[in-house]
Image (spheres, helix red, strand yellow):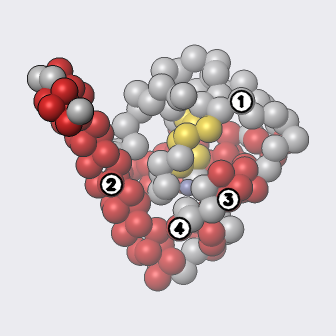
Amino acid sequence: MVNTVREGTDHALIFEKNRVKTFKNWPHKTGKISKENMAKAGWFKCLPESADDAVECFCCLKQMEGWSSNDDPWKEHLDHSPDCEFAKTGVEERKLTLLQFIKIVEKRSTNLIEKKFEEEQQKEIEHLKSLNVYQFLG
Ligand SMILES: [Zn+2]
């Protein structure tokens, strides 16, 4: 489980040029998983700025780590998150149509709301557990 501290809710991360800037201390300097290629494929680096390689997608919010130099950031993205609106396009930001871009940003909003909802739901379940409500369910 990846520990996210950098907030996926930061709207600046929608843009590739801002995602590139998050790759401080990125351990993979060359090849397909250079920071530029990672940012192109939708990833930004999770905090803290340690030498680990945990990343998150700005659109589907999928988190991944443990990259190897032969990995293809687009292929890994699609393999692990086949419904990602951005990864499905398979093209970097500057090649997106306006309509594709709007759909991606809309889907990102939905994903953020669903994630928030699930977090709140989990908190509520923990709260109910702490009240011992479930003992009445048998
Ligand atoms: Zn994604």
> Disc 3 residue type?
Leu
First of labels 1, 4 by sequence position: 1
First of labels 4, 2 by sequence position: 4
Q: Which residue is mark 2?
A: 114
Say if 138 sits above or below 71 in the image: above
Near-viewer residue (59 or 125) = 125
Q: Which residue is mark 3?
A: 78
Q: Is residue 85 found left or right of 91 in the rendered image?
A: left
Residue 107 lies in what quarter of the image? bottom left
Find out whether the residues at labels 1 and 4 contact each other: C-beta distance under 8 Å.
no
Residue 24 position, x and y percent, is 58, 27
Residue 113 lies in what quarter of the image? bottom left
Name the quadrant of the N terminus.
Answer: top right
Q: Residue 84, labelled with which disc?
A: none
First of labels 3, 4 by sequence position: 3
Q: CA distance from mark 3 to mark 2?
A: 20 Å
Q: Which residue is mark 1?
A: 66
Name the quadrant of the C terminus.
Answer: top left
Near-viewer residue (127 or 110) = 127
First of labels 1, 2 by sequence position: 1
Residue 102 appears in the rendering: yes
**Ligand 1 closer than 8 Å to label 4 CB:** yes
Residue appearing at x 37%, y 69% in the figure: 106
Near-viewer residue (11 or 88) = 88
Task: Specify few, some or many for label 4: CA neighbours under 10 Å numbering under 14, 14-19, or 20 or more.
Answer: many
SS at mark 3 in the image: helix
Near-viewer residue (58 or 125) = 125
Q: CA distance from mark 1 to mark 3?
A: 16 Å
Q: Is residue 35 found left or right of 133 in the rendered image?
A: right
Q: Residue 85, labelled with which disc?
A: 4
SS at mark 2 in the image: helix
